[in-house]
Image (tube, rainbow, N blue to C red):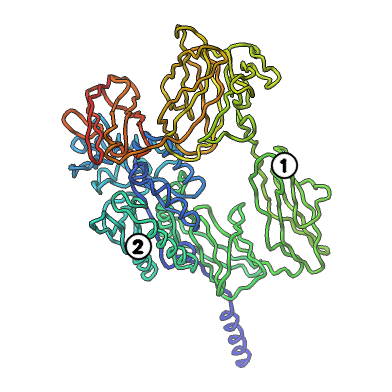
Amino acid sequence: MKKTLTSLFVFATALIANAQTPSTTIATWKNDCKGAYNIIHDDFGDYGVIGIQNYADTMNFNRGLKFTFGAITSSCEADQSMYTKAKSMINDHGHEIINHSHTHSCAVGNANCGGTGTNYQWAVPGNTQKFNIEIDYSTSSIKTGTGYTPRFFIYPYDQFNENANSYLQTKGYLGARTGAYNSAEANDFEPDNLGFFRTPLVVDVQNTGNGTFAVNLNYWVDQAINNNLWVNRELHNVGNSGWGSVSVADYRTHLNYVKSKVTSGDLWVGTISEILTYQIQKLNFTPITTYNAQNKVINITWNTPTFDVATYLNPLQVKSPVTLKVNLSGLTAQDYVITQGVKTITSKKVKNGILYFDAYPSDGAIAISLVDCISLCISSQPSGLTVTEGANNVTFTVVASGASGVTYQWKKNNVNIPNATSSSLILNNVQIADSGNYTVVVTSGATSLTSNIAKLKVNKKVVPLHTPYNGTPFLIPGKVEAEEFDNGGQGIAYYDLTPTNTGDATSFRNTTVDIENCTDGGIGYNLGYTDAGEWLKYTVNVTKSQNYNLDIRYANNYADNKITPVLKFYLNDTAITNNISFATTGGWATFKTITVPNIYLKAGDNQVLKVAIVADDANLNYFNFTPAVVLGTNEELENQVTLKVYPNPSANDFVIAGLYEGKVEILTLEGKLVKDYFVENNQTFLHVNENLPQGVYIIKYNGKTITKSVRFVKL
């Protein structure tokens, strides 16, 4: 009897020793990398850092990397193309926009510019405002301009205090950069009890005789990897201008090095919100792992953190899940089906007995089913798709294996789809009605399994309101034929006051626009009978940002110029000319050319050129844009600067014209800087829409060899 008890004890001990005890941890950094790294480019919107959009954007995207960029909102408002570019950088390339103030100049000579009290004031052009108003304004500006709410603030010149940080927290900001230079974060860095992070950064610059350049870029990547750290790298421009700039060659070399470390699995590169949201989850959640041997299911539940992580994450547009590492403890399977609530997590990998996948702990418990595929197994589920109406080759695919071969039957909204009996379902010319939930039933012998739901969303195809007449936009430089305005109809592609074509070319186009057979050269057509209030639109591709001369081919027969035709040109609803008046040519069939010089156009495809008839009546043949030839030295060109402001006085927007390469400043009469702009050598005017208060200002042009100023009155 004693011997039997001993045998039972040994047997029971062996069972306990062989029991499966999987365990789960949260990786220190995403993808279980050794270190974390992110780049923040400051001063986006300022002309001195256009290398951010010209170089950094594409160079990172081409390597599968992303960065964070801090916007100066007044600069973006002054040039709305900056916000247009920012939206592309965010939506198309995955970069993150954050707030770098409205004016940036607040901290110059003012060590207390951060704060909310009456003694802590930031300057907004023409109006002294408190920090809370500055933050509210700049936050709203970024959201209006890009659709994204910024969640991180960069203090200009690192001027801050705790009152300022407290106000940022009330506005939903996750953190702020407060100026600890050349310092990396340990992997256990914590926020305050409200989840607000005060982050250090690595700026690492040196002054040389040629400017300020970033150095030792790769050194800090190695620091992050070798010491399990997070490095928050600050940069400004990519190019040869701006404070703390890095050359294009050095930047490219650095990104290649960063990419090599990402590829090797050593480095995680995220945006600032991704880093901070990963950390807040890692600090607050602890996975609890159990194993149901009978059902072969690993269950992961979570502690209840004292910090409300779900509410913290819910409103964020940019965030990151955490990487979970499940030690399988010897458990093996053909497949691991991971579910969290109704969601299936399909991206996973197993390496050295560890199962890796990403999840948000706040989304709830996780079940990992071990599928052995003895009879039937789905090893790859179909994925949901979002397509545009009319799309072809829309494909759902399932991968399954079974003991006696596999058959398939696809369903839409649980109804069989006729003849859909292969492992892939291909849909062509999809329509809105094709939207729905798609599944497939796979069968092997007597066993059947139904796949996860793959949702198909079909968005309605957006048809442009007006399209190029010949299907292809006009090229600039090049000729725009007046009669070949866009297709689209009255009020969309053109506006004409007469109900029919008053001209004689009625067979050319079926519109109400008045088109004639052209006598200018004996071929083609021209517009005639133009009346004040009419307009036409033309889709154009501007191939290069530069100044152009506009040649207008026209005819007019009003004797003694008693009636003077007037035109005005717009690009994307922004005026590119003033009113253009035309002298008589001596006959309706006698065409002459008038040239409007030095019109600045920005490069871009599918832009809309609008020709407005301000006063009748002229016959119009074509509009020809040719590059303006710039001759002379910088000094000679600067001496041609006229520096005009119109309208002056002005109650609203105004234009600063007659410029050349240099810097334009708006100053108070006391010499206090309100706003400054950098002007490129192909930019002859600035459109200013700053909300200046009433008063008298000095508009100052600073060139390389000359300085000019003019007094301006804001009503």
Task: Report which quarter residue 376 is drawn in.
Answer: bottom right
Q: From this view, report whether residue 157 is shown above or below residue 406.
A: above
Q: Which residue is disc 1 drawn over?
A: 430
Q: Percent x, y for residue 290?
A: 55, 67
Q: From this view, report whether residue 621 is shown above or below residue 543.
A: above
Q: Quadrant of the N terminus?
A: bottom right
Q: Percent x, y for residue 600?
A: 42, 33
Q: Which residue is disc 2 drawn over?
A: 217
Which numbered marker is on residue 394?
A: none
Residue, x 34% and y 60% (percent of image)? 189
Cβ–Cβ under 8 Å for marks 2 and 1: no
Marks counted in the figure total 2
Q: Percent x, y for residue 204?
A: 28, 59
Question: Foreground residue, 140 or 439?
Answer: 140
**What type is the residue that disc 1 sits on?**
Val
Residue, x 72% and y 58% (percent of image)? 398
Mark closest to the chain's N terminus, 2 or 1: 2
Q: From this view, report whether residue 149 is shown above or below residue 18.
A: above
The answer to whether one can see residue 195 in this image is no
Question: Foreground residue, 25 or 583?
Answer: 583
